[in-house]
Amino acid sequence: VFNVVNGDKEAVDALLHNPEVVALSFVGSTPIAEYVYQTGTLNGKRVQALGGAKNHAVVMPDADIDNAVSAIMGAAYGSCGERCMAISAVVCVGDDIADAVVGKLQEQIGALRVGDGTDNTNDMGPLVTEEQLQKVRAYVDLGVEEGAELVADGRGLQVAGRERGYFLGACLFDQVRSSMRVYNEEIFGPVLCVLRVGSQEEAMDLIDAHEFGNGTCIFTRDGEAARYFTDNIKVGMVGVNVALPVPVSSHSFGGWKRS
């Protein structure tokens, strides 16, 4: 039997305090994840609580660019980026690889079809609410104000016959810095940031310094580099040449740090 129970805090609290509920799994923002975990465990329940995320993809100089870009496109813009495992930051090791990645991302973004979510020929549908649309648009505005280079701007998108829909085209920032809010905060929308670093160590230091540690991945042909990354990165779920980490027995499942 599978039940769908709609409701806000009242429904959640009912589950957290019900003695017949022995285990709970939660996915959402970090403050609520902390509340669910603390309340549930105090009531003697087993709790899995997954919080916020800022998932990174590292692209090494030896990576298969076409494979990396194709995987990143799906991970960043699938479901309009409104999923906890979405890739929202690409860390390119070297300017040459960054230029190639950004160029190919621009090409594929230009080919995306955005429209009614019930039309299977569309690649992206609307965002979940008008409030979320305005929130994501505000982050795009903020990124421009912070000095990032907006190389793909989806803010002006209009869908014929759906003018009041909550549509936003894919957005891509280049030359993003780690001090920017558009990088540090979870946006939960079709916004992808590209950062440029000089080495794998610098890329890993950047990821490890972030408050979230949900999922990450690396694109490389070098087995040693991939193994070093998976063994040492401070993130819960790790993929190699796949943008959405696939759970395997040798790695944990679930976020680390504030994820």
Image: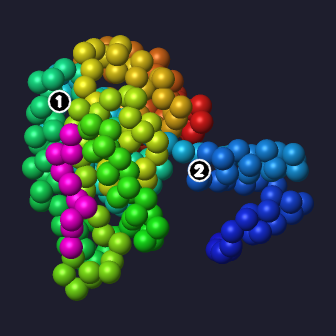
What residue sits 21% from the left and 76% below the top?
A: 159
Type of amino acid under label 1 = Ala
Q: Position of residue 89 (x, y in %)?
A: 34, 38
Q: Is residue 179 above or below residue 159?
A: above
- Bounds of the magenta span? 149-158
Residue 58 in sight here: yes
Residue bearing mark 1: 98
181, 252: nearer the viewer: 181
Q: Position of residue 24 (x, y in %)?
A: 72, 54
Residue 81 in sight here: no
Is residue 100 toward the left or the right of residue 80 in the image? left
194, 222: nearer the viewer: 194
Q: Is residue 216 above or below residue 10?
A: above
Is residue 44 toward the left or the right of residue 194 in the image? right
What residue sits 33% from the left and 34% below the top?
A: 57
What residue sits 79% from the left and 62% below the top?
A: 13
Q: Is residue 232 above or below residue 6?
A: above
Type of amino acid under label 2 = Ser
37, 3: nearer the viewer: 37
Q: CA distance from mark 2 to mark 1?
A: 31 Å
Q: Position of residue 164 (x, y in %)?
A: 32, 81
What's the magenta bit mostly, secondary-structure-wise? loop
**Residue 145, image quadrant:** top left
Residue bearing mark 2: 29
* In the image, residue 156 lies in the stretch drawn in magenta: yes
